[in-house]
Image (spheres, grey):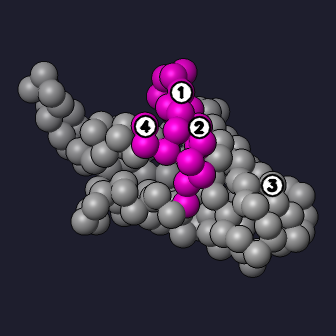
Amino acid sequence: MSQLLTMFERACTAFNNAPNTPGNYNNLLRYLHHDVTIKRVDDPTTVVGIANVIYYLNSTQVIKAPQLIVANSTEWPVPTDPEIRATIRGDGTYQDNSVAYVDVTGANHLPSNPFNIHYLFGFTRKTANDFWLLINAVATPT
């Protein structure tokens, strides 16, 4: 398995486990580029910059415990190991809230149903010897 796919699997595991981990989404910092941009899955807004992404995740997602289950990831270019920019795309499922929770208005929410998504994640690093960092993340319902 390539360095990129290995890092991607670790980052997905850290994301899925974050709500139950001390530090919550702060554990994703090691996987994110300082200029990271994420598109929210359930609406068309964008969160830009590592501090804003971590704040967004910790302030809105911990109680929901979203889950990203990747299925058939493909990396480009192949092989990615000598590259400094690469992408991973594929299909999977996303569950916006995997646990019941009460929102800030006091409304109760049951766990949501998982839905199919197509994802495209962009990665970068300074040299082929450096650690891959996520710089762009987009996942759209299919």
- Rounded to the nearest whole Å, what is the CA distance between mark 1 and mark 3? 21 Å
Return the residue at label 4. Answer: 52
Visible residue check, residue 120: yes
| Mark 2 or 1, nearer chain start | 2
User: Do the residues bearing badges 2 and 3 touch, measured as CB atoms within 8 Å?
Assistant: no
Return the residue at label 2. Answer: 37
Q: Count up the numbered dots.
A: 4
Magenta stretch: includes residue 16 = no
Q: Where is residue 138, by image quadrant? A: top right
Q: Amino acid at mark 1?
A: Thr
Magenta residues span: 31-52
- Rounded to the nearest whole Å, what is the CA distance between mark 2 and mark 4? 9 Å
**Camera-side residue of 98 and 53:** 53
| Mark 2 or 4, nearer chain start | 2
Give the image location of residue 5, x and y in percent. Answer: 70, 68
- Rounded to the nearest whole Å, what is the CA distance between mark 3 and mark 4? 23 Å
Horizontal relation, residue 136 to residue 129: left or right: left
Q: Where is residue 114, by image quadrant? A: top left
Helix, strand or loop at mark 2: strand
Q: Which mark is residue 46?
A: 1
Return the residue at label 3. Answer: 85
| Mark 2 or 3, nearer chain start | 2
> Local crowd at mark 3 within 10 Å, few (<14), some, or many (≥20)?
some
